[in-house]
């Protein structure tokens, strides 16, 4: 549908910066409200409570460890807990993206959007903001 070389490209940071649409078309399927922690999550929490867990590494971005109240979590690939603008690096609570993610629409940074509409110079000092193609690529929010 998006002409990606490989499906996993949607999770590649460089590909995301150029084309965030594939990620946002799929992210609603991974959104944290869709799933509940499993018995395994509860077991890990029990280990943590008993002092037997040094840390829990996860490659999942679904934040189920957080939902299970596991505090010693290392999110190896990030998570939906926060989101960061790929342009200005502004970090926001991940829940601010919920409406966009569930609607399968690319989330936009409020700060960068305000700068564009106000005609602030872009990073190269040019007046009038970025060309539309770069604006679309750079103002996406990445979880």
Image (cartoon, rainbow, N blue to C red):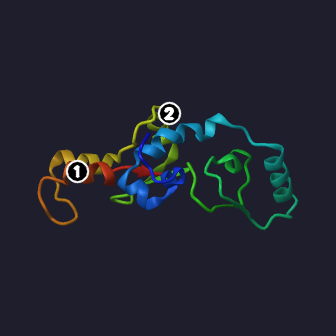
Q: Is residue 134 left or right of residue 28?
A: left
On the image, the x and y values in percent for residue 142 come to 45, 52
Ranked by sequence position, the earlier of labels 2 and 1 is 2
Structural crowding at the residue carrying mark 1, measured as other residues with C-alpha within 10 Å and reported as few (<14), some (14–19) or many (≥20)? some
Q: Is residue 122 left or right of residue 12?
A: left
**Which residue is denoted by mark 1 in the rendering?**
115
Name the quadrant of the N terminus. Answer: top left
On the image, the x and y values in percent for residue 4 come to 44, 50
Report which quarter residue 125 is drawn in. bottom left
On the image, the x and y values in percent for residue 72 come to 72, 61
- 4 or 130: which is nearer to us? 4
Structural crowding at the residue carrying mark 2, measured as other residues with C-alpha within 10 Å and reported as few (<14), some (14–19) or many (≥20)? some
Q: Can residue 53 be seen in this snapshot? A: yes
Picture layout, residue 133 above or below residue 13 = above
**Which residue is denoted by mark 2 in the rendering?**
102
**Number of numbered discs:** 2
The residue that appears at 56% across and 50% down in the rendered structure is 81
């Amino acid at each position: 549908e998006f002409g990606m070389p490989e499906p996993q490209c949607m999770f590649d940071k460089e590909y995301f910066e150029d084309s965030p649409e594939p990620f946002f078309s799929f992210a609603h399927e991974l959104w944290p409200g869709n799933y509940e922690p499993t018995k395994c999550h509860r077991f890990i929490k029990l280990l943590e409570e008993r002092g037997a867990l040094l840390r829990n590494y996860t490659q999942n971005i679904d934040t189920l460890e957080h939902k299970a109240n596991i505090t010693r979590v290392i999110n190896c690939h990030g998570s939906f807990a926060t989101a960061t603008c790929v342009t200005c690096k502004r970090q926001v609570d991940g829940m601010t993206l919920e409406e966009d993610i569930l609607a399968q629409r690319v989330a936009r940074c409020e700060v960068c959007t305000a700068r564009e509409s106000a005609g602030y110079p872009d990073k190269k000092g040019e007046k009038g903001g970025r060309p539309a193609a770069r604006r679309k690529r750079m103002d996406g929010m990445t979880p």
